[in-house]
Amino acid sequence: MTSYLVRRVAGALVILMIISAITFYLFYAVPRDPARAFCGKICQPETLTLIRHNLGMDEPLFVQYWHWLVGIFAGRQFVQFGDCPAPCLGYSFATQEPVFSAIVDRFPVTLSLTLGASVVILAFGILTGMIAAWKVGQPLDKIASSSSVIGASLQIYFVGPLLAFYLVDTLQLIPRPSYVPITENPLGWFTHLMLPWVVLSIIFTANYTRMTRSQMVEQLAEDYVRTARAKGMSSRSVFFRFAWRGAMIPILTIFGVDLATLLGGAIITEQTFSLHGIGELAVRAVQNTDLPMLLGVTIVGAAAIVLLNIAVDMLYAFIDPRVRLS
Amino acid sequence: MRSHSRRIASMTAVLAAGALALAGCAKGGGGGAPQSAGGASQKPLENKAVSAISVGTAADSTGPAPEVAGAKPGGTAYMIDRDDFSHLDPGRVYLNYNSSVSSLFTRQLTNYKEDDAGNIKLVGDLATDTGTTTDGGKTWKFTLKDGLKWQDGTPITSADIKYSFERLFADFITEGPDYAETWLVPDAKKPFRDQYKGPYDGKELDTIETPDDKTVVFHLNAEHPDFNFTVAMTGYGAVPKAQDTKQKYDKQPFSSGPYKIVSHITDKSLDLERNENWDPKTDPIRHAYPDKFHMEFGLQSQQTTERFMADTGNDKQAFTFHNPVAPERTQEVLNDSELMKRSLQGLTPFTTFYNINTKRITDVNVRKAIITAWPSKQIQQLQGGEISIGKIATTVMSPTVLGYEAFDLYNKLAKPEGDPEAAKALLAKSGDPNPTVVYAYNQTPVQEKVTVAIKEALGKAGFKVVGKPLNAGTYYDAIGPVDNKYDIYWGGWAADWPTGSTAIQPQYDGRLIADNAPNYTHLNLPEINDAIDKANAIADATEAGKAWAAIDRQIMDQAAIVPEFYQTYFGLYGSGLGGVKFDPITGEQSALGIYVK
């Protein structure tokens, strides 16, 4: 188990390094001089040269990448920005703030959005999926299945402003979505994020409903279920004690990927509700061709995917006794 | 690139500026009902013309600022906008958006004061007046007012002002203006940082003297009679040596104004509260009615427009510095008389235009044909009409610049949709009835449509237009090189202070052509270069204004640009605020007179 974990983490680090190197080199393929963003309206050539030096951009590309890597462990000093303590992912070209602290500042927003939405998604998605499977072919199944199709067809940028218009502006039932730290005001955290959770979950829940239903139906047709029933176990016991375990493996796999994607930034939801999370940071980084921030956000997104994949693989063993880690 | 104006800027006479349209706020439904959803059919709201810009007296420079009718102190004013302020260290401020917020906590030697009629006066801000010069603008003396204090209660002295200018030479301060730095070193033609490297190694700048705590004397390397306009830029705001945290100062500047920063979360919020050590008696332009300002970022125009329209909760007490009414909501706002009561509009200092690369299109008749055939009206319509994007321009200088004269050499106001027949006649003179021109543009959905309109209109005149879409993030990198391969490309400009020198010289002085320099047309004509020198040498501001207007006409006669728009602003604010005004100097909403009802 330990050696498995070490192997996976080492592999993850190699993957992250490859991703960072590719992102770094690709950025420099863009015919743009980031130094211009730091130069006044009437930009003198000597000022531009000074800025390139301040940013370390007058070094060969591999040296710049090496400095970036070293900065993660040892920190760096930039003339243009000042100290950048470890772990230093550089300074944003657009906002002139340390990339690492920008990500750390925004991570609670994305984490809150992701975790809250995940609870809603899993609770409703799995519940409705299981009900549909339990009552397969019956009206409840049809209602759950058609609702999920409708949910999957909707778009966050349509549902979000629509619900905000009615629930926030017109009826004033809930406060305008924003991020209130849970440590400061747990109730405020809950009420201010309620709408984004619901909107995000409308889209995602549909997938989980459909997936749970199909997986459960498939599991209920398996030999071990027939055997259990033949031995006299009640349908309820078979359903809730055995069949769900088998159904959960693919659901967990997909959930791991979805969770990681959301942690890397629920871009549309954050934009729709003006939540200052990782997704918003990513959009701005792309818009501004902001390499340090782009690199930082990419690494965070990639790390989330790689690490959650490891976590999901390990969870298989707990859910399904047939799975052994080696 | 630098102004060598010889105007005696300490004059006190009011200087008529022709049709100067430093538009004041035109509240109260001046727009009438639009005829259809199309931008061009909107009945434009009048941009009230302001008749004068002047240099104020010592009396004009004394505080407190005249009371705003109905104003009362207290409450929190909210500001909602798209972006965080990219810089707050005065030395690194160039964008007007950054200047707008800086005016709440950063003061300069001089500043602009607007009266109820919309007239603009340059007045002393930290200084008792707008400065004095006895040698045509080579030596400038400013005296600081009594009672000036930093936010910690320590006095603001002439040493602070000297230090504020010295630190602009530091290697990390690269984003702000560099006029004063270039003028304060012995040789203006050599890089200023080669001559002085800033105060952090203990060396002082000899060209700034402080004979006592109240007096600061600048010795410039040439005559700059409008130096007192230069130091009104936020980039020359005061920074105390004792509180200078170098690079970190950009996030947490120390206040000399009516508010101080209590919290700044990048890209999220900025909170200001009253600076108890600011004395209104020293300040002729700022009020400080609200107890606090809470500013929130990350909201697109559509979102702020919808929030102002909904007018609920804290949004009632909200304004925006920059976000205009979203184009898709413009008609709805114009049709709502209640919303129009809390709308602001006016001409900003910005002009937009299409540079014609005179190194590639050398025949003036071809350039004239381009302007003549240009579909100005269609482009205006595609971007929301006059109220959303701007008035169709016919000159280089904006109506907000002293000396502006209205003229229309190519009949664009009579035929804004383009005149293909007249353009054909011009092309016939050139000997090439079907020239090919390469038009480079930002590849955005709107610009794609604009490009189609341009191709169509110029095509009718006989041109073959080759569109070259450019990435918005690398647009200026692509058009910046002097040897770029494009014939026509969009640009924008605003004068750094409202005189002709910074409106015209950086862009059309042929001696300043360089890669990435503002002279994107690459126009280099001895007669225009000479005229620029002569205009800079005119001491009388009114006469200088006329000279700049004449140069404007010369440039247009050379058809170096297709003027596009004199940019307009149209914005909303919440019903719970009073005293919200449009600032014609920044082209944004001003926070200086705001009060919570």
Image (cartoon, coloured by chain):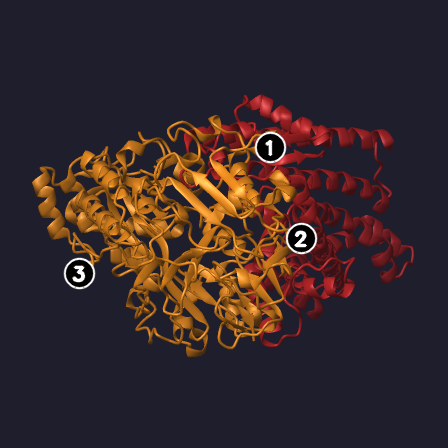
Chain colours: A red, B orange
Q: Which residue is mark 3?
A: B414
B590 relative position to A167: left or right: left
Q: Quadrant of the C terminus of chain B?
A: bottom right
Find residue B152 and name its label. 2
Residue A287, can we see it? no
Measured in 3D between alpha carbons, the distance from the residue under mark 2 to the one under mark 3, in whole angstroms, is 59 Å
Q: Residue drawn at (32%, 67%), measured in percent from left and top?
A: B48
Which chain is home to disc 3? B
N-term-proximal mark, 1 vs 3:
1
Along the line of sight, the residue nearer the viewer: B568 or B427: B568
Q: Do tag 2 and tag 1 residues touch (Cβ < 8 Å)?
A: no
Which SS class for mark 3? loop
Mark 3 packing: few (<14 Cα in 10 Å), some, or many (20+)?
Answer: few
Q: Residue drawn at (9%, 37%), measured in percent from left and top?
A: B431
Q: Position of residue A317 (x, y in %)?
A: 84, 41
Q: Quadrant of residue B328?
A: bottom left
Which SS class for mark 1? helix
Residue A135 drawn above or below residue A283: below
Residue B90 drawn above or below residue B382: above
Mark 1 packing: few (<14 Cα in 10 Å), some, or many (20+)?
Answer: few
Residue A310 drawn above or below residue B422: above
